[in-house]
Image: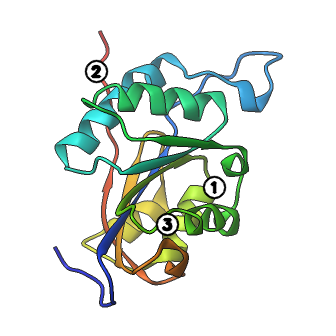
Amino acid sequence: MIERAGAGPLRRLVVLRHAKSAWPVDVADHERPLAPRGRRDAPAAGRALADADLLPDLALCSTAVRARRTWDLASAEWGTPPPVRHDRRLYAAGPAGLLAAVHEVPAEVETLLLIGHNPGLEELVLALAGDGLDDTLDRVRTKFPTSAFAVLTWRGTAWRALAPDAALLTSVTVPRGKKK
């Protein structure tokens, strides 16, 4: 794996867009549940994260129902899920708000999972990635679909040091569950 220059341990920020949501009538946006496809794709995302050895030390998750349910279904695929912090600020946050939440993560966390919404997540990935492997940057610029996750790596002694253009976008994965 190519690593960006810098001091400190290698850190990974895994950015996961919530799974496909439903649009029921008279339900507030924050309360929207997952659609059937989302209920299939979220566990597939959990399996893909485990298969790629990307299990986090900590997860930050939007409080929106669709994000929380994505976390529940994805993390259920792991033996022992890591701690999760549900943070209302992540709901509808832009890149600056998302990065502010990341900056608060304790230094001992080396792999962080961030679960939230577009367009903020896509914009955050593009802002933080100073470079990308293969076609990863083009793929995110084209579309960052539901259940997709992007992996950003960087070296630093603390999360508060993560800045625009400081990370390398190493992979983008779009897991899909199988219809039964």
On screen, residue 98 versus residue 174, left or right, reads: right
- Seen as rendered, the residue at the extreme right is 26
Q: Which mark, residue 129?
A: none
Residue that numbered label 1 is attached to: 119
Q: Position of residue 107 (x, y in %)?
A: 44, 69
Q: Position of residue 167 (x, y in %)?
A: 40, 78
Along the line of sight, the residue nearer the viewer: 23 or 101 = 101
Q: Secondary structure at mark 1?
A: loop
Q: Which mark, residue 178?
A: 2
The residue sitting at 60% across, 67% down in the picture is 99
The residue sitting at 41% across, 25% down in the picture is 73
Distance CA(mark 2)–CA(mark 1): 26 Å
Residue that numbered label 3 is attached to: 125
Amino acid on which disc 1 is placed:
Pro
Distance CA(mark 1)–CA(mark 3): 10 Å
Amino acid on which disc 2 is placed:
Lys
**In the rendered view, would you say 47 is above or below 168?**
above
Q: Position of residue 29 (x, y in %)?
A: 76, 31
